[in-house]
Image: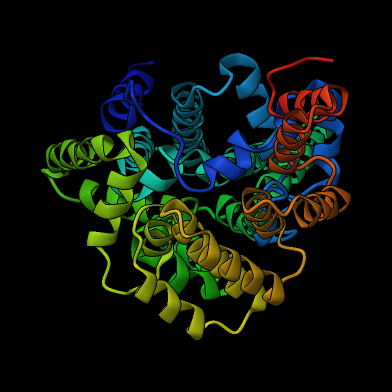
Amino acid sequence: MKFFLLILLACWLAFAPGEHTQFVLDDYYCIVQNPLIKQPALYFKIFTSHLFDAYKPYGNIYYRPILELSYALDFHLFKLNPVGFQWINWCIHLINAWLVFVLIWMLFKDRWLSFLTAIFFVVLPAHEWVVRYITGRGDSLQALFGLLSLITLIRAFETKKIFYYVIMGLSLILSVLSREFGYLMPLFGWLCIYIYRQKERPVLPFALWWMAIGSLCLIVAGHLITKLGPIQSLHLCYFTSIGFCLAIAYLLLRSSIGRMFGGVLVVVLALISLFQGPFWIKEEVLLRHTHSLETKAYTICHQQLLMKYDEDVKAITEFIHQQKNPSIKSLWCWRLGQIAYLHGDLSHAGEYFEQSLKYNPTNINSLNARAVVYLQLGNDLEGLNLLNKAYQQDPNYIDTLNNLGTYYLAHKDPLLAQKFLAQAKYLAGYERT
C-alpha cells in the first residue's frame, strides 16, 4: 500500500490537471466536434467509424473505437469540460504505473525494482503528450489493456486456468482497438514468458529486448516522426519507456546509494513534468512553447500556429508549393481564404476557396466557406447550391446544418430553419431526442 501511495503522490505532483486547461489540437475533432460521443443513439456508429471522421480533410484514418467510447463516457460525466477529460487521462496513467509495478514484481520478485520502475514511469516528462493531451489517451489505453494482457498471461501460465486466458485475450483485443500498436503485444508476451521460465531472470537483457520490440512502432510510424516533431513524437514511446525505466532502476539499485539517488531523480523528473503544466492552459501558448523547442519548420505545432493563429500568407503559400497531396493543398488554400475573409476581402476569399475546391472538390469546409461568401455577395442561388451539395455529401456535418438553418431563417422559412438548426444542436450534444 505504501508503494501505491507514493506512486499516486508522484503522479499527482507531476501531472495533476490545472483548473483552466483547454482542449487543444485534435481534441477539437475527436471530442468537441464529434457527434458520436455525445448522443447514446449514435454510440453504435463508433464501431463503424474512424477517429477523425469529424475532420474531413484527414479522411478515414485510425480505427480506435475503445478510445472513442471512453470519450463518450467522459462526455456523459463532464460534458465539454476539458478538466474532467484530463483527470480521466491522469487516472489511466496512474493505473498503468501500478500495473507496471505488478508486472515487474511478477517477473523478478523484487519490490524495490518494481517500485522504482513504476515511479520513474509515472513521472517521466516524455509522457506529457499522453497524460495531458486528451487525444493522447490512445497510447495510455493501449498500455493499460496491454499490461493487463501480459499480467493475465503470466497468471494463466502459472495456474493453467481458462479464466486468465480469456481475460488475456479480451485485453489484447481491447489494446488493439485502443491504438494500433497493440499488435505488438504478442511479442511482449513472448518476451515475458521467456524470461519467466528462466531460473535466473536477467533484468537488463529483458529491459533491452522490451525497448527493441517497442522500437518497432517507431519503424512503422517513421513517416510521422518528422511531421510530429521531436516533442510530440515522444508519445510513440509510452509503452516502450517501461523498458527504459526498468533499466535505469536496475542500474541504480546496483549502487549502494542507488535508492537515495533514485529518489532525487524522481523528484527532479516530477518537477520538470510539473513545470510543463502551465503551458496547457491555453492552446496558443502550448503551441508556441513547443515550437520554440523544435528546430524544423512545418512540424505539427508550426502548422497549427499557421492554421489558427499566425496569418503568415508567405509561409502558407510556400508550404502549399511543397505539397504533392491535393487534399493537403486544398486544406491550406482554405486557410488562405479564411485569412482573407477575416479581413473582409470577400473577393480574394472566394478565389482561395475556389482554388481549394479545385484541388479537392469534396472539401466540405471549403464548400461551406465558398457558399457563405456567395451569400454575403448576394448570390443566393450559387450559395444555396453549394450548401445543398455539402449537405448531400454529409447530412450530419454541423457547419452545413447551421449554415442551411441560417439561410432559411433569413429567407423567412422557419420550418426548414428549425429542421436544420435542431439537427445541428442534436449532433452537437445540446439536445436529446
Instruction: Give the tally of numbered discs.
Output: 0
Q: Examine the rendered structure and indicate whether residue 188 appears above or below residue 296.
A: above
8 relative to 430 in the view: left or right: left
Q: Nearer the viewer, residue 290 or 431?
A: 431
Residue 227, visible in the rendered structure: yes
- Does residue 296 appear to the left or right of 397 in the view shown? left
Q: Residue at x 40, y 67 (%)?
A: 299
Decide which of 249, 53 is in the foreground and name it: 53
Q: Position of residue 341 (x, y in %)?
A: 49, 55
Color theme of the render: rainbow
Where is residue 103 drawn, in percent x and y? 52, 39
Quadrant (top left/top right/bottom left/bottom right) for the C terminus: top right
**Image x and y of residue 81, in percent:** 49, 22
298 relative position to 197: left or right: left
Q: Residue at x 18, y 37 (%)?
A: 271
From the top left corner, tell me how far across and down residue 254 is, in percent: 22, 51
Quarter containing the N terminus: top left
Determine whether 176 is above or below 359 in the image: above
Closer to the camera in the image, 178 or 280: 280
The residue under the point 83% across, 54% down is: 385
Asked if residue 207 shows in the view, the reply is no
- Is 339 rendered above or below residue 107? below
- The one nearer the camera, 75 or 374, is 374
Residue occupying image coordinates x 59% and y 70%: 351
Q: Residue furthest front?
A: 378
Q: Quadrant of residue 260?
A: top left
